[in-house]
Image: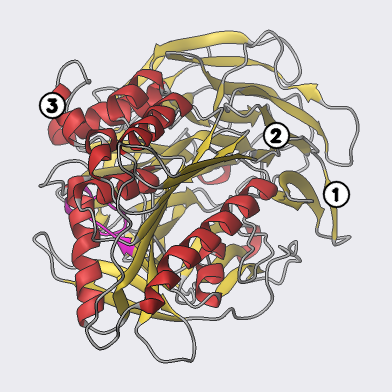
Amino acid sequence: MVFTADADGRCEVFTWDAAARRARQVTDRPGGTLHGAIDRDAQVWWFAEDARGVGHWRFQPFDGGPDRPGLTGVPDGTARGLAVTGPAATGTTVTGTTATGPAPTGAAVTGPAATGTTVTAGALTAGALTARAATARAATAGADTGTAALTLGIGLDDSTTVRLGPRGGPGREVTRVDGPAALAGLAPGGDLLALTRAADSPRAVTVLTPDGTEAAVLPGDGPHGRLWALGFAPAPGRATATLLLVRERDDHYSLATWTPETGTRAHDWCAFDTQITARWYPDGRSVLVRQDRHGRSLLHRAHLDSRTRTPVPAPPGTLLDAAPHPGGDLHTLWTDSTHPPRMASTAGTPLPPLGTVAGRVPGTLRDIRTPGPDGPVHTLLSLPEGGPGPHPAVFLVHGGPADHDRDAYDGTVHSLVASGFAVARVNYRGSTGYGPRWQRAFRAGVGHTQVADLAAVRADLAARGLIRPEATGLWGTSWGGYLVLLALGTRPGLWRAGVAVKPVADYAAAHAAATPALRALDERLFGGTPDQVPARYAHSSPIHYADRVRDPLLVVAATHDTKCPAAQVRSYLAALAATGARHESLWLDSGHDGYDGGDHVAVLRRAVLFLDRELRATDRTDRTTGTAPPRRPRPPGGGSAHRTVHH
């Protein structure tokens, strides 16, 4: 097994020898390492990237030794998939897939037992002011021998290249496509590979031969419904290459398969009302489906030949991953809001300890549903144990927007609750986990719809006596940080303070400097580019409302951020300074997805202290009249109460 976990404050790749119950650290890079895999010949793989996410794949033997580049002659770029196979390979797994499609950093490893697991876990230390999160990913494979062929996808400036070659040898280009794409899998025989692009495009999935010939183009636009590829079936159960697909249509998600002989076959009998991901069982004839539904996880086994679906027992909470193994073993990574992640095997296979907080953490979770124009808005509300309410509250705003908060452990929630705050995690309109209609509900426009939901939940929680309305703050990262800035600018005075970490502050400027994948996302959200629909971008850009911000604000940004670029954050800070808004900034020498625990701890400590200072100030509120102290007036003549700290 290969997994990633904490190593002296950084995320690094480890091997795990289950028989010896021993872990070995493989990587030791200054910025940490997130993406790892293991192939059928027990070669360990990782993506060696810089702070911008640009790098290349490397590998070394399971027991150690010199490392080598996966393919030579391949330009550095962003990770867009990895697949390894050989003449004896008979199985497949795809790692790095999201709830509704493959992430661009996915990896596929094929081999007779390569049905492994891809998991996300927390490895942290936590307390009232400290928490450290890391991501654990694991994949297992068989150990038979044979010459391995390697296929990988690399994202360049405005295109994606797919390269093929012998492991460690020269790579030749199979294809190059414009814009973002990802390698979704390689057939066990190495004769077909799948490339996935925008799920709603006419070329959502392309099946290619190793010489670049198109074997099939599967559309995801119009009446076809959005489409994602999740990998080829292991060979034991299939005489021909079979590609697993997920299709969104008629407000449901259903399984589908493709083979060269039959083309695409829909399995509408296996449909779900909320987002799913799936992976093959080792038999190659059934599929394990993991469903994200209303902040929690459900497991199902779909038997494709008999067209039946059975539930797979799972404890309440969230399964960050689940992977079937030969012999009926099922590996899971489970958590809930009061229990840090833990790995488990139904067959008792020894799995690596994650080094998380032992036992249950403080806090009581409540599910709150607030009426809204497109249906109830679901909030996971964590309350401090003991002591009378209502409590000062922090709204922890998730990013995405195609993501959602789960009944899962979060070190930030742990730290805030231990410090006496209520924490509200709101799955606003646009979130996943509540079906396609909810994800498409942007009736008030990008950002403004979500801000309206946050405000409605705040009023509801205050009316229920659960939080103190005069002592509520916002904290968000990435798109969540964007919503914090937009909320403070469009509804000044409603929130007492805000923390925005690596946010979008100026949508048009961010679009111009961001990665191709994020530019494509922006254009889908807004219905065009900033040149085509400038009013929409301006209407949803926090910088347009910077002169209205009157609540204290902490902005955290990264100098090498390619997703929420530093320049547009600096422009926003300059706009705040010009109007005299009280704000602070913290700059990190990292990228958007930093893997250094020291940065996480620095941000956590700074943000908790900032919110404690600003929200606890309302303890001077007259509890009889409910009146909070007045806002600080702006300095005469503009000026700015502004502090910048570099970390």
Task: Please indicate whether residue 616 sits to the left or right of residue 361 in the image.
Answer: left
Q: Residue furthest front?
A: 636
- The residue at which mark 3 appears reads as 535
- The residue at which mark 2 appears reads as 46
Task: Work out whether residue 632 or residue 480 is closer to the camera in this orientation and state it.
Answer: 632
Estimate the x, y position of residue 206 in percent, counting from the top left.
Answer: 37, 23
- What is the three-letter code of the residue carrying label 1? Arg
Q: Which residue is drawn at 28% across and 46% down?
A: 549
- What is the three-letter code of the residue carrying label 2? Trp
Q: Residues within 10 Å of mark 2 (few under 14, many from 20)?
A: many
**Within the image, what quadrant is residue 17 found in?**
bottom right
Q: Quadrant of the C terminus?
A: top right
Separation of marks 3 and 2 at Cα, in angstroms: 43 Å
Q: Residue at x 19, y 15 (%)?
A: 531
Magenta residues (range)? 426-439
Question: Disc 1 or 2, which lies upstream in sequence?
Answer: 1
> Is residue 219 visible to the viewer in this orientation of the structure?
no
**270 above or below 518?**
below
Estimate the x, y position of residue 633 in percent, counting from the top left.
Answer: 30, 53
**Within the image, what quadrant is residue 574 found in?**
top left
Question: Disc 3 or 1, which lies upstream in sequence?
Answer: 1
Q: Are marks 3 and 2 in contact (CB under 8 Å)?
A: no
Estimate the x, y position of residue 138 in percent, counting from the top left.
Answer: 66, 50
- Magenta run includes residue 573: no
**304 above or below 514?**
below
Q: Secondary structure beneath disc 3? A: helix
Question: Disc 3 or 2, which lies upstream in sequence?
Answer: 2
Separation of marks 3 and 1 at Cα, in angstroms: 54 Å
- The residue at which mark 1 appears reads as 24
Task: Please indicate whether residue 505 sits to the left or right of residue 441 in the image.
Answer: right
Task: Please indicate whether residue 492 sits to the left or right of residue 398 in the image.
Answer: left
Task: Please indicate whether residue 381 sits to the left or right of residue 62 in the image.
Answer: left
